[in-house]
């Protein structure tokens, strides 16, 4: 994984599969960080993901990495990702060894997201923040780093057909920015 993170790669966007989209000039992007946390288990390494609360205004019920926007008190996107992981799922900051970053990802909701890759160095108890997180779950790293598990699907968004990556796992429909970031990792790891 460290070797894969050392490879060069282009930034990604929610528009990669939709080149006909013309983005407005001068758009304002807000900085955010997400934690692609990998923990060891007897079955092999697993990625920690969340199912967002259905009560949230934005992206209710969707699968996501722990993370969020960079706040004024955060030194950078890495600090924001670690803070959000602590707040959203109870992952202590000191239990994460940051091993690198994937190229930034621009979302349709005007965020520029820095995917922070970290190894969970000790067990911790999941503590989902009930206002934001409905569930914390794990997906085998081998599943989300195999390009064969990804597919491209589409749906109507703002009146137009929008293509996006998916990487379903059991009952979890992983799609959108989360799947696109995982796809970027899968491409690097399979190179």
Image: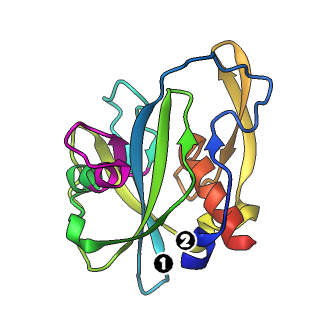
Q: Secondary structure at mark 1?
A: loop
Residue at position x 32%, y 40% from top? Answer: 70
Residue lying farthest to the bottom in this orientation: 42
| Residue 125, visible in the rendered structure | no
Residue at position x 61%, y 62% from top? Answer: 185
Q: How many marks?
A: 2
Position of the C terminus, as image quadrant, is: bottom right
Q: Return the disc, 1 or 2, that comes first in the chain's sequence.
A: 1
User: Disc 1 designates what residue?
Assistant: 45
Residue lying farthest to the right in this orientation: 20
Answer whether residue 71 is magenta in the image: yes
Q: Secondary structure at mark 2?
A: helix
Q: Taking 27 as reference, is 181 above or below it?
A: below
Answer whether residue 78 is magenta in the image: yes
Position of residue 59 measured from the top left corner of the image (x, y, whole percent): 44, 31
Cβ–Cβ below 8 Å for labels 1 and 2?
yes
The part of the chain drawn in magenta is 65-82
- Seen from the viewer's position, the closer of residues 172 and 121 is 121
Task: Tell me the crowding category of disc 1: few under 14, some 14 to 19, or many 20 or more residues within 10 angstroms, Cα based.
Answer: some
Disc assigned to residue 166: none
Task: Tell me: 170 left or right of 64.
Answer: right
Position of the N terminus, as image quadrant, is: bottom right
CA distance separating discs 1 and 2: 6 Å
User: Disc 2 designates what residue?
Assistant: 141
Position of residue 46 measured from the top left corner of the image (x, y, whole percent): 47, 72
Residue at position x 34%, y 52% from top? Answer: 81
Position of residue 150 measured from the top left corner of the image (x, y, whole percent): 71, 55
Task: Tell me: 10 left or right of 173.
Answer: right
Residue lying farthest to the top in this orientation: 159
Residue at position x 50%, y 27% from top? Answer: 110
| Residue 165, visible in the rendered structure | yes
């Amino acid at each position: 994984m460290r070797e894969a993170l050392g490879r060069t790669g282009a930034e990604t966007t929610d528009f990669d599969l939709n080149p006909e989209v013309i983005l407005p000039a001068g758009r304002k992007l807000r900085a955010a960080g997400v934690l692609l946390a990998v923990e060891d288990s007897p079955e092999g390494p697993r990625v920690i993901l969340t199912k967002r609360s259905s009560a949230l205004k934005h992206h209710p019920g969707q699968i996501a990495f722990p993370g969020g926007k960079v706040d004024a008190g955060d030194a950078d996107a890495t600090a924001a990702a670690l803070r959000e992981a602590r707040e959203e799922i109870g992952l202590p900051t000191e239990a994460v060894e940051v091993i690198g970053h994937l190229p930034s990802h621009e979302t349709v909701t005007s965020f520029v997201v820095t995917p922070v890759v970290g190894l969970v160095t000790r067990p911790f108890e999941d503590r989902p923040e009930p206002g934001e997180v409905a569930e914390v779950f794990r997906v085998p790293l081998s599943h989300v780093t195999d390009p064969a598990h990804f597919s491209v699907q589409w749906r109507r968004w703002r009146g137009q057909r929008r293509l996006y990556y998916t990487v379903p796992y059991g009952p979890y429909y992983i799609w959108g920015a989360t799947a696109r970031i995982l796809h970027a990792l899968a491409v690097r790891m399979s190179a």
